[in-house]
Image (cartoon, rainbow, N blue to C red):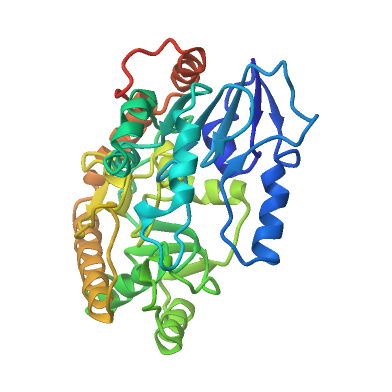
Amino acid sequence: MKIIVGGNGYPEKRNIITDPSHRYLDYRPRNIWTWINVIRQRLFHKNKLFIFRPLPLMSSVDADIIHLFNEVSSGPGDWVATFETELPRVLPVEGIPKFANPELARELRYVCSPRCKGIIAISEATRQIQLRLLEHFPREQAIIGPKLHVLHPPQPVLQEKNALVERGPLNFTFVGKEFYRKGGAEVVLAFSQLLRENLISVNEVRVNLVGDPGKTHNVAHQAFQDDDAFRRSVEDTLRECPLFQHHTSLTNDAVLALIKTSDVGLLPTWQETYGFSVLEMQACGCPVITTNVRALPEINPENAGWLIRCPLNPMLELTVASVSDKTSLRSAIISQLKTYILQIISDRKIVSERAKNSLARICLEHDPKLFRKRLNTIYMGFETDKNKTFF
């Protein structure tokens, strides 16, 4: 098949550009909205619109289908879209309630169009969020609902198994470019507190952290960002505590090499639409400790890893509406993280068991060949069970 895509970035490579038998045409430079958005944002200070329409005379008429990520198509040609939160994706406008936004109503019409052959949620959590959106638009819901699928991203196995560490230090690894949003501070605080409390020693544990502490903004904290004093304390501890080995950044190959030598992964994240790093860790036989936001309970069930349970809002995310909320959530994350660390140290066999289960679920639920087959059925319109979750 010849497939037009709206870009060739990480989301597209992870969810769309997956079948070597297809030919993919990157139309991002040909998308008129790529250039309109530059004008909208720079000159008029308006929101970006997530719309795809090829520039006049630059459309490939012989393409079989258009496959977009987080975008809707307003132009000619059959299309599908994979999305991570809601479709259409419409940014909030100050002073206009979300469901009264005329842009949202306009773009929903594109999804209702017969040219839209399917919309693909990357998780069941995403599907549930989409259904809540559609509840406010019953006419559109009747048309869009049957087009809605769930298809989790593919993930090949990267290492058959991680050998159980019988003695010596256990290796924990955190990977998160956005250090604070992904829970890097909570990792530092949990391990350093356990060390000060004499509940762990430098002979039992090594902690690798890959992430940039300069990425200070945490979108989950909204108006209640951490102050400079808090960040200095975390970064001083990261630098001075003998447990930690920190890398501001590594190549993807170096990250995977590090994970392959690790026993337990760490992602106590504040905000996450999916959690691709969890799949990569599991595919290396490295079970993961995560929070329970969005899709993480789906891809990190407790037989394959460890879930830090926090209260969630209807969007399946954490709510930080005050400093008190942030403090309470941080305390819960650190407390549960410390509990799991101690359990793991006291019973290393649990790591081996969950490593095997992690690999098994990757093989069963993220098989690349099965993913390609199921995606092709959506392209061809053969899939009849429209609400079935496909891993």
Lateral position of residue 314 relative to residue 165, left or right: left
Given residues 198 and 285, the one toward you in this image is 285
Given residues 4 and 327, the one toward you in this image is 4
Asked which quadrant contains residue 195, the reply is: bottom left
Quadrant location, the C terminus: top left
Establish if 144 lies above or below 285.
above
Quadrant location, the N terminus: top right
Q: Position of residue 108 (x, y in %)?
A: 44, 38
Establish if 187 lies above or below 351.
below
The residue lying at 34 percent from left, 23 percent from top is 146
Establish if 266 lies above or below 203.
above
Q: Residue furthest top?
A: 382
Q: Residue furthest bottom?
A: 229
Is there any visible trace of residue 167 in the rendered image? Answer: yes
The residue lying at 36 percent from left, 26 percent from top is 143
Is there any visible trace of residue 261 in the rendered image? Answer: no
Q: Position of residue 355 (x, y in %)?
A: 32, 39
Lateral position of residue 10 relative to residue 63, left or right: left
Lateral position of residue 343 relative to residue 383, left or right: left
Q: Position of residue 168 (x, y in %)?
A: 35, 57
The residue lying at 74 percent from left, 27 percent from top is 59
Q: Position of residue 227 (x, y in %)?
A: 42, 85
Asked which quadrant contains residue 249, the reply is: bottom right
Given residues 214 and 3, the one toward you in this image is 3
Q: How many marks?
A: 0
